[in-house]
Image (cartoon, coloured by chain):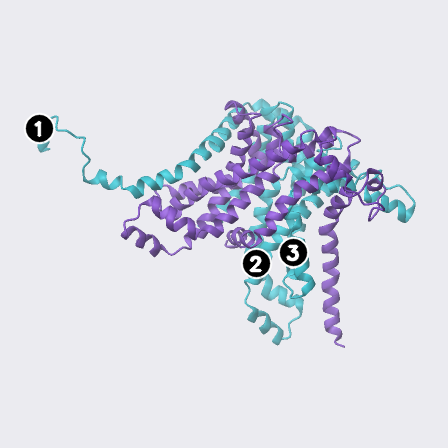
Chain colours: A cyan, B purple
Amino acid sequence: MATIALPRIDPASPVGPDKKALSPWLVWGILFMVPYVLVFVVFVVYPVLYGLWLARDPQSYVKLFEDPVFFRSMLNTALFLMIAVNLKFVLAMVVSGLLVQPRWWIKILAVLFILPWAVPSIPTILSFRFMFNPEWGIVNTLIFKLTGADGPNWLNNHYIALGGSMLVHIWKSLPFWTLILIAGRLAIPAEQYEAASVDGASSWHKFKFVTWPSMQTLYVTSTLLSMIFTLGDFNSVYLLTGGGPADLTHVMATLGIRYLRLDQVDMAMATIVCAMPIVLPLVYFMMKRLSK
Amino acid sequence: MNWHKVGTETKLLLIGIPVFLWTMLPIYHIFLFSISSKEEAFAGKIWPDNPTLRNFEVVFSQQHYFLNHFWQQLWNSLWIAMAVGAITLLVATTAAFAISRIKARGGRLVMNFALLTYFIPAAFLAVPMYKAMSTYGLLNNQWSLVLAMVTIASPYAIWVLKQASDKLPYELDEAARIDGASPVQLFRLVYLPLMLPSIVAVGTYALLLAWNEYLYAFLLLSNEKDVPLSVALGHFLSADDSPWELLMTTGLIYALPPAAIYYAFKRYMVSGLTAGAVKS
């Protein structure tokens, strides 16, 4: 501490280590991240913290658990995740197997097959909705033409309405996941299939011993990711059934918005907090997978 | 005749035909309504006896109560989508550059924040986002929708760009640094040109995401003249005797631009956007 005898030496000029720490690369590295960090803080961190604060009253959860719509929504969400997502992936597996076949007509089909993903969901969901219209929809018109009897009021039955929402959801998201599985199938070396053919393997055995082992990881990861997306699927339910009849077809995503529209923000946030036990493990798993 | 081969082809067709019908039915249904008069649309015909463009005329000249602001709403959809595309690109390319090329301090953390946001289901984030926008005084301001969509689009954009950026040879950066390039020059002259395919993919992704959005638009905006076309389509449901033929016609007009953009950029979209997902 030799400088102690020389107080008030001007410390303004930057010294060695400081200069290094403030190298332009370091500064620019941070500056380049500022726009996103701002977006993240202002539109994710603050809203989420504020939202959690709004849902701080335990009374909100008591009220939520007393609302029969809440349990119905939990059940519907679980059904959606178990049935719609798994059915979608079985279909994606089958269709991806079809679309990798080298045929001229399959090339055309592959182009058309992407349409549901390429077009916005509102018009197509409303198109489905009108098809189920009891008086004028194409479904009941066909039933009338074939049998002479009036068809049922489809969306008035909550099982059919929920099933219809799942159908719409699958219609919309099947192409994307099929593309992913096609990429997975194309990554399997052709020699493996040739070797299997030489050994006289049937198509089922080829699937079981060649295709499935190579695609297992992709299939499971995709299914889990699709579950997260499905949890946030508001449109398929809201635009087809509006949560009806009698609020029996709500899922967590539409229920939160329903409370918000009823000006019960604490209930809306409480609903979302209650969905976290499903969301967080999925998110944790995906983060581990992707952030390597 | 090879019976085994015929069997295979039959099997393929047995899957292919239902797949075709399943895919096309709702879309054909929209198209059919758009060229049918109301009476014919409701009669359940496969093809109208008198196809007509009358519905398009009504929509374009805003001759129906639900369509009073059609052109304004189409414009809203367009500028909001373009603004979201541009701002997302700005936010995401800079962040991906800092994380992947400069290896900025805290870059890994920022990437994890982005991924975390990507995995919050959008319908769940909508509730707190709505309240926050109300605190910021942005409700019923179109910028609230733009900023909300940037928030939702940028995490995936950053991730896709980072994946692509990690593949660029690091020697390029070293060579540029030795030549005395500044970080900004490296970004502008080396990084952006090389990343162009991914940037096109990501920009298109953000643009389409914003154009197609319904939930955030209908929560954040309520004025008829402010809402994009997606919300206007939803308004048709408020009446029992909706003019479905006009709804479908407007829906077709609304669906055409994203479909066209998607097919035009398909090459970039499929390789750029699915590459990330497949890598696991």
Q: Quadrant of residue A217?
A: bottom right
Kindly identify which chain the residue marked by label 2 belongs to: A
Q: What element carries label 1?
A: loop
Helix or strand or loop: what does disc 3 sit on? Answer: helix
Question: In the rendered structure, which amino acid carries the disc numbered 3?
Answer: Val
Residue, disc 2: A183
Amino acid, disc 1: Leu
Residue positioned most to the right: A148
Cα separation between marks 3 and 2: 15 Å
Above-or-below relation of A225 to B221: below
> Is B219 placed left or right of A56 in the picture?
right
| Residues marked 2 and 1, same chain | yes
Q: Residue at x 57, y 32 (%)?
A: B126
In front: label 1 or label 3:
3
Q: Mark 3 points at which residue?
A: A111
Chain bearing mark 3: A
User: At 42% across and 48% down in the image, what residue appears?
Assistant: B192
